Image (tube, grey):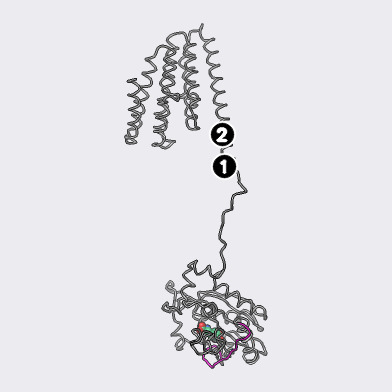
Amino acid sequence: MNMQQNVLEKIQQLDKLETVHLQNAVIGLAELATEEAQAHTDPQQQRLFLQHWYGNDPGYFWLIFNKVRSRAPRESVWSKYGLLQLLKGPASEYIQWGMISHEPKEAIELLREYFNTLVHNATNEHRFLLVRFLWESRNEGIKSNISENWLKKADPGLKRSLGQNFNELSKHLENLFHVWKAQVEADTEEATSAFEKVDLSLPGVHRPIGSHHLIRQVFQEIEDIFVSIGFSVVEGPEIETPYYNFEALNIPEFHAVRDDMDTFYLELPKGAATPLLLRTHTSPMQIRTMEKQKPPVRVIVPGKVYRRDNPDATHSFAFHQIEGLAVDTDITFCDFTGTIEYFVKQFFGPSVKTRFRPSYFPFTEPSVEFDVSCPFCGGTGTAAAGGTCTKCKGAAWIELFGAGMVDPAVYGFVNYDAKKVSGFAFGIGIDRLAMLKYGIDDIQVFFQNDVRFLRQFP
Ligand code: DAH
């Protein structure tokens, strides 16, 4: 009883030890086990001892095994060594007896008993592997230990029966290991298939499906309208050269309109061929398109543009435009206004009216600003519930976008014959249009990507 308490106490203390001291403590316990194995001379007592240490009751060895394994990595040499010492003690003791007593049968019986107890209590693979290692390992193993120290040195008269007993034990253990392994494999398989079983009656995992951002939806709406009347959709780079963003659009270096647009230049290595900037409008794609193709040209260009605007309810440093360009040999101002009117009616509904006012852009001549009769108050300036219409602020008209007939100077940059071709261009601010149509009063919500906002436009 005293002995048992002593052992249990030592096992509890393992928890408090620093890892570096664990190995010595385990080896100390291994010595205790060996001492106890030596102390019992009666086979009955030996069996009790084996149960205490290596069986279930209380299973000192397995308690120690768990503690060591939770503190040391599985591969750790010292933990394996310490544990092996713990296991080896009694087995070496039995071998010793067999050698001394010249009555090896009993010793082999005890060894068999010992390994039976170990295998039956090796309830997981790691325990099992250690037990098998104890038996089979080439240098440390009990098997080689028996044949080296016991069989080879046995009296010639004993050798035969001893060898027979040993072979039996060997077979028995191999069989035990084999059965155990098959059992473990079957268990894991069963556990895996139970785990993988699918219950089709359970409700499925709900994965919310995303939707297009409102800006993309408006792009799509506008693209559809223009595609239906023969335009194609092209896209261009967001990083541009000043040539495409300005010069080729008839905006020379010291032109006043650059004040609005001289904005985000990229930091380039010294000696770069040309400065680069984030495009301030989609108009550079007019040039790129005409450079690539001969008339007739009918394209729209959706995309992002960048300006050094301070963010507020109607300004953002990044926003969206759709550029439009139609060039052919016989395009008139009538085609131009007809196309725009068609688009506006498709977008806002057939009852809206359009008008244009003179304006100025360096790349169009004449230039205009298109307005639409306020679709919210029916162009009256008065809200349905009385009072001023908040959308057009009582003006009855809403400013939509800039446009015009392509300035002949622009054709000069793309090798079009200004005497033979004519065309129109327009640049629609998408964010403003989306805000108008969907009653949104702050442009910033387009960039904040708050799902509570996005969800409203599935
Ligand atoms: N690029 C102009 C801007 O961003 C908009 C514009 C005006 C585009 C007239 C055009 C146009 O194609 O004809 O302010």
Residue 248 visible here: no
Which residue does the image show at 48% across and 22% down from the upper left? 117
Label at residue 187: 2
Classify 57 as above or below 159: below
Q: Amino acid at mark 1?
A: Phe
> Tag 1's secondary structure?
helix
- The residue under label 2 is which amino acid type? Asp
Q: Which residue is situated farthest in the front direction here? A: 385
User: Which label's residue is closer to the chain start, 1 or 2?
Assistant: 2
Residue 52, above or below 449: above
* Tag 2 secondary structure: helix
**Which residue is the site of mark 1?**
195
Q: Nearer the viewer, residue 128 or 221?
A: 221
- Could you tell me which quadrant the C terminus lies in? bottom right
**CA–CA distance between discs 1 and 2?**
12 Å
Whether the magenta-drawn stretch holds residue 87 is answered as: no
Q: Nearer the viewer, residue 322 or 193?
A: 193
Residue range highlighted in magenta: 349-364
